[in-house]
Amino acid sequence: MPLKLAHSPRWYFPDTDRRRPILEIALPIMGGMASQNVLNLVDAAMVGRLGDVALAAAGMGSFANFMAMSIILGLATGVQAMASRRVGEGKHDETAVPLNGGLFLALLIGLPLSLILIGYADSIFRLLNDDPAVVEEGGAYLGMRLAAIVGVGMNFAFRGYWSAVKMTRFYMRTLLIMHSLNIFLNWVLIFGNLGAPAMGVVGAGLATTLSIYVGTAIYLALAFTHSRDAGFLHRLPGRAGLATILRVSFPSSLQQFFFSSGMVALFWIVGQIGTSELAAIHVLMTLALVAILPALGLGIAGASLVGHALGARDPEDAERWGWNVATLAGVTGVAIGLPALLFHDPILGFFLTEPDTARMATLPLLITASFIWYDAAGMTLFNAHLGAGDTRRVMVITIVCQWGVFLPLAYLVGPVLGFGLLTVWILNIGYRMLQATLFARSWRAGEWSRVEV
């Protein structure tokens, strides 16, 4: 059954007074996400010049790296949920204390994890693909990316903090520097410019890792300058505070792990169909992630505003913030999908040099563009739950939809029944629609408002 409106349509669409705080937080994030879009596109285009094997290796390696990183990505959720509650409660001198805890946990968990996984990078890649050429390039690329686990964990903790305290301009500026550096280093290290060795796809991995740690250094300098009065580096959270960060973060990290491992499983499933299909889905997933990133920026803003309202003991206002941001994200999704519908051939031709591979990806891209608005709205309600600290519910919904429904069906219709990439992609879009609907129903039910952070 469709959702029934409990209020007038005007209540769901934010007026000027409510759009202002949303955009105050979201626009810098969206600017940073736009630079992420450019980086993803340029990175795929640069690696794509090396051929389908390199593109397949980078694609699978990126998602395998995301799976490894996911164990600490949830720290952003814990830091943001706690810091935004402190803002809502008026405890401004304590807002950076959760950040201190997040940085400590990123180092404590990330360093040994990175060292262990780097030693097994080649073995991990052999489990994911049986094409010797893809494995040879992908294992080395993955090892380079795994060296950045600590930096990624710290950067995500900073993202949660900047979002909670409405200082996302620092997030945007730092990402712009990181991504510009990454593109430059790609040019140097992939192709051997400025006297550097031509490292190919491995150079792309090294460029990304170096840019991540430059970003970490910038964040530390900014926080030391602007957040000392908020408790930055003054003290760690007590045992109860660290336990709360872990309680909120762990389900989010687990959800991220299952999501990223699900993406790796999807790449493995498509890899059983063919290497050209694997190259095509790498581009399709890159474009889909590019399209959803603005909604992620809006969702992060919504998460902070939900946390502020709950900290001020106003759950009705928190609910409205969730719907307000979802409405804006849906409108944004329509605007993003339209160019892909109109210019799909030149977009795919920018990344895929093999004509047959580009033709294979055309209809899946058109389907994605037609439904991205609904996925975007669902993504913001996903983040609204995270802002309320209701990370366990998010974990259950996403794991059941992806692992309980989509992946078994994708394996059945793809490698087993031989229906090919298009049918697998249609199932992918369908599972995203189901997930968005479940988040909307959960937000309407309101149980998230009773979570204590």
Image: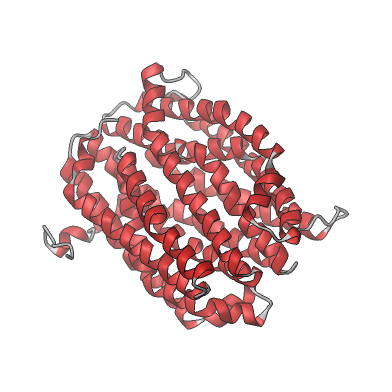
Question: On the picture, is 31 further left or further right than 299?
Answer: right
Q: Is residue 291 above or below residue 31?
A: below
Q: Name the residue located 48 percent from the left edge and 26 percent from the top edge.
A: 100
Question: On the picture, is 150 further left or further right than 251?
Answer: right
Q: Name the residue located 30 percent from the left edge and 55 percent from the top edge.
A: 325
Q: Inspect this view and state whether residue 303 appears.
A: no
**Quadrant containing the C terminus in the rendered view:** top left
The percent position of residue 61, horizontal first and vertical second, equals 64, 53
The percent position of residue 127, horizontal first and vertical second, equals 64, 50
The percent position of residue 140, horizontal first and vertical second, equals 74, 49
Question: On the picture, is 291 further left or further right than 16?
Answer: right
- The quarter of the picture where residue 303 lies is top left
The percent position of residue 370, horizontal first and vertical second, equals 39, 75
Report the front residue among 75 and 118: 118
Report the front residue among 321 and 264: 264
Report the front residue among 324 and 76: 76
Q: Inspect this view and state whether residue 401 appears.
A: yes
- The quarter of the picture where residue 379 lies is bottom left
Q: Is residue 310 above or below residue 145?
A: above
Q: How many labels sit on residues?
A: 0
Q: Name the residue located 27 percent from the left edge and 56 percent from the top edge.
A: 438
**Quadrant containing the N terminus in the rendered view:** bottom left
Report the front residue among 400 and 30: 400
- The quarter of the picture where residue 317 lies is top left
Question: What scheme was used to colour the molecule?
Answer: secondary structure
Q: Is residue 326 above or below residue 144?
A: below
Q: Residue furthest front?
A: 416
Q: Name the residue located 51 percent from the left edge and 37 percent from the top edge.
A: 72
